[in-house]
Amino acid sequence: MKVYIPLDSAAVALGADEVAAAVQAEAARRGVPVEIVRNGSHGMVWLEPLVEVVTGAGRVGFGPMTVADVPGLFGDIAAHPRALGQVAELPWMKGQTRLTFARVGVIDPLSLAEYEAQGGLSGLRRALGMDKAGIVAEVTASGLRGRGGAGFPTGIKWKTVSEAVADRKYIVCNADEGDSATFADRMLMEGDPFTLIEGMIIAGLATGATKGFVYIRSEYPVAIRVMQAACDLARDAGLLGASVMGSGHRFDIEIRVGAGAYVCGEETSLLNSLEGKRGVVRAKPPLPALEGFMGKPTVVNNVISLATVPAIFEKGAAYYKDFGLGRSRGTIPLQIAGNVRFGGLYETAFGLTLGQIVDDIAGGCASGRPVKAVQVGGPLGAYHPRAQFDTPFGYEEFAGQGGLIGHAGLTVFDDSADMLKQARFAMEFCAIESCGKCTPCRIGAVRGTETIDRIAKGDAAAIPLLTDLCNTMKAGSLCALGGFTPYPVMSALTHFPDDFSPMKEAAE
């Protein structure tokens, strides 16, 4: 009997470890040999822990499982009350275009043999037969942009580092996934770590870098453990070290753990932290691509950006670019959370409307009440009302609506949400998380929180002051923390003015 039970943090939080122990104990009691594979999550969080049993017809899913449901797995599984059928055939899975996450939930994350059997290392083998310029050109032609939030073209960043002259260069993977409602980086590292390693090696080949760092937030203990184990296995197999796959190219990876500062998700703060300094923002220029880690040319890319590279080289830039719309090419892992019926990760091509994502994929609000707003892009993303639900999911399309995609996290709110309180939360969050380097962020967020409190008490004259303050923060902050905080504040004020009305406070 072969059973898949996720080691994914969300599944573990919902009881996956206990279910795994119960399966092992029940098998021993019955004298049934059992192989338990701790895989990644398929992304259907509402069904976690999702247990899969291998049958002659394929992998049959059961979920959400509890310890009490385990004995039924050893009987007539077709009659099991938690039976879902073949996981690959569930509507949530069939509707996706899984390129970056093709193996997540499917394979044993720490089996290099399974990784290779499912297409892994094909991209690296192809890249090893190309020169630096050819690798960079392939990434550029794919249209891949930074999936960490900024959406900067990956090929341009790699080209800058590749052409820079230096005795050492570095690849830094930003795995400091601090935005609320974002978990794609964690899921990828826990469920398919070798694809991130492969992507970083290809980045090293493209730029001449010989050392890579994965900077993981300390709140991700499972991802840290899996990534460290995967690097050790890759080193033993000759993928990392003095000669990648016997090619003569040197590249190795070191795992570093962050101390928990939100601002270290910003690339220059991250670099300071990597160097053992306080995590504060650096002024730019110089750009990290020219003077990054230890003053050397450095590629700083998000987990999903780097983990997508192997698929591009395996299938070709033209294949990848065929997905998407406008300047948003390829696929995007949507992370759906908040007040929704179906929360989780859903990878699809750019271009679905916000309404399709919220109403069709997420299933609307779990409360059964109408959707009031959707925040896209984490705690610094704008709130979008239903009037904007026809907006296609793309970088420029959301910018045109006064928003941003960010790391593609979506948080859904029903009509009971108070948008003034949400705006205040954004300002308070910025005040708490500010590194203190620049005045607009350090002081502006504190004054912003105070100004919203004045509005809440009925001081309508403070609204123009809030608007002016947001404009100052947006234009004057050194990084996106202070610069993007106005997005949730001003979108809440613009689209939900009644929540900022003194009449509302009086009525309550």
Image (cartoon, rainbow, N blue to C red):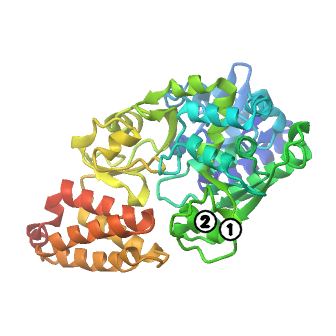
Q: Which mark is residue 274?
A: 1
- Return the residue at label 2: 270
288 and 508: which one is in front?
A: 288
Q: Quadrant of residue 308?
A: top right
The quadrant of the rendering that contains the N terminus is: top right
Q: Residue at x 67, y 57 (%)?
A: 297
Q: Which residue is rendered at x = 20% and y = 53% of the image?
A: 495
List x then y, in percent, for residue 155.
Answer: 58, 40
475 and 483: which one is in front? 475
Residue at 59% across, 52% down: 10
- With 96 as the anchor, is 70 left or right in this view? right
Q: Amino acid at mark 1?
A: Leu
Three-letter amino acid code of the residue under disc 2: Leu
Left or right placement of residue 441 versus residue 247 in this view:
left
Tag 1–tag 2 contact (CB < 8 Å): yes
Figure disc tally: 2
- Give the position of the C terminus as an image quadrant: bottom left
In this rendering, the answer to whether 270 lies above or below 386 is: below
Element at label 1: helix
CA neighbours of label 2 inside 10 A, class few (<14), some (14 to 19), many (20+): many
**Gap in angstroms between the C-alphas marked 1 and 2:** 6 Å
Q: Is residue 137 left or right of residue 486?
A: right
Residue at 29% from the left image edge and 50% from the top image edge: 402
Q: Nearer the viewer, residue 137 or 118?
A: 137
Q: Nearer the viewer, residue 281 or 369?
A: 281
